[in-house]
Image (cartoon, rainbow, N blue to C red):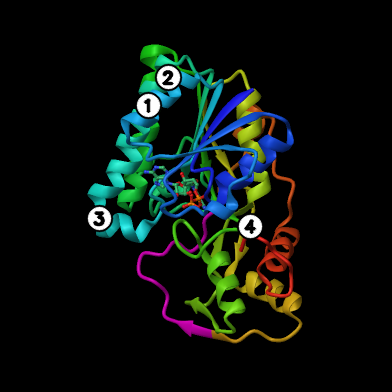
Amino acid sequence: MKTFVTGGAGFIGSHLVDYLIQQHHEVHVIDDLSSGKRSYLHPQATFHHLDIRSDQTGDLIREEKPNILFHLAAQADVTRSIEDPKFDADVNINGTIQLLKACNDAKVQKFIFSSTSAVYGNLQKTFITESDPATPFSYYGISKLSAESYIQLFHQLYQLPFIILRYGNVYGPRQTAKGEGGVIAVFMEKIRNEQPLMIHGDGEQSRDFVYVDDVVQANIAAMTSEQNGMVQISTGKRTSINQLVASLSSLHNKPLDTVHKAGRKGDIKHSCLANQKAYDLLNWKPNTEIAQGIQYTYSYYQPITENTDN
Ligand code: NAD
């Protein structure tokens, strides 16, 4: 199939591109390299160094007429969204609209969108399902939720087929401590620089960490699905910060220094996303246990391993 991946030079997008190429699909990447890296780009992918908001992007999609478009390009840095909500909205909302219009004109068979659990904001619930209210607490959460609404309305008005994937905390090789980064990438960077790991509060707060390969498989399942809809992509399990530190310490073979800081205001104590709907709609479930995923990620970040791209 002819596939387009926006954000294909980024953390998740580059893993998706690698898999699509391994499966012999034709892959085009649209990326402005604002946070992605050229070294992550698969050499067999056709690279278009473009901004998703540009008219050239729209023209390219109309000309190439892909079967499937995976939309991962985003301003994915929560802090930056707070500092510059206009830029965040421009990339995440206007960029998505530009793609939707072009995909509709090009009769793309499936528009697959990477969304986020940030749309729920500080929902005080320990187990979130898709029917819970989305009440974002960052401009990033607002812009991703708005993009979802545009996708749904394009479907209602023009029958553009779509799947929205709301990810939990994604982790794995190539992730940076910026963006939706999250604690695992931050810890990997600290370990690499031989700096202490910072723990806010008692470290018992927990999150739902989903490994990047499982997220890739969710995108693949969305590509082949006949369904339209929105699903959460998660493990349905909680891992605490203390558990993460313990796993990393055992891999590191020597105790890791930790620094305790006061708990962050507004931080949710536990957050976990149901994944039953993803199974029902896409026949997808995660395959990587946290211990395994942490090990793969740790090996990638260690200077002794021979990584060509980190
Ligand atoms: P990333 O920053 O590594 O990747 C984003 C890619 O988009 C980068 O390669 C960047 O250069 C590109 N990009 C940004 N703005 C662009 C623009 N205007 N035009 C063209 N390209 C542009 O982020 P990631 O973690 O791989 O996230 C991928 C997607 O998954 C994003 O949509 C993000 O919102 C979503 N997501 C990520 C996580 C996570 O934990 N990493 C969780 C939930 C959702």
Q: CA distance from mark 2 to mark 3?
A: 31 Å
Measuring from the top left, give residue 10's x and y in whole percent. 52, 50
Which residue is denoted by mark 4 in the rendering? 172
Q: CA distance from mark 4 to mark 2?
A: 34 Å
Which label's residue is closer to the chain start, 3 or 1? 1
Q: Residue at x 71, y 58 (%)?
A: 293
The quadrant the N terminus occupies is top right
Which label's residue is closer to the chain start, 2 or 3? 2
Measuring from the top left, give residue 173's x and y in whole percent. 64, 58
In the rendered structure, does residue 263 fall within the stretch colored magenta?
yes
- Which SS class for mark 1? helix
Amino acid at dot 2? Arg
Q: CA distance from mark 3 to mark 1?
A: 25 Å
Which label's residue is closer to the chain start, 4 or 2? 2
* 197 vs 192, nearest the viewer: 192
With 235 as the anchor, is 73 left or right in this view? left
Amino acid at dot 3? Asp
**Residue 303 visible in the displayed image:** yes
Q: Which residues are magenta?
A: 259-271
Which residue is denoted by mark 3 in the rendering? 84
Residue 297, placed above or below residue 160: below
Amino acid at dot 1? Gly
Measuring from the top left, give residue 163's x and y in whole percent. 52, 28
With 274 as the anchor, is 295 left or right in this view? right
Q: Residue at x 56, y 59 (%)?
A: 175
- Which SS class for mark 2? helix
| Image quadrant in which you'd find residue 169 | bottom right
The quadrant the C terminus occupies is bottom right
Q: Nearer the viewer, mark 4 or mark 2?
A: 2
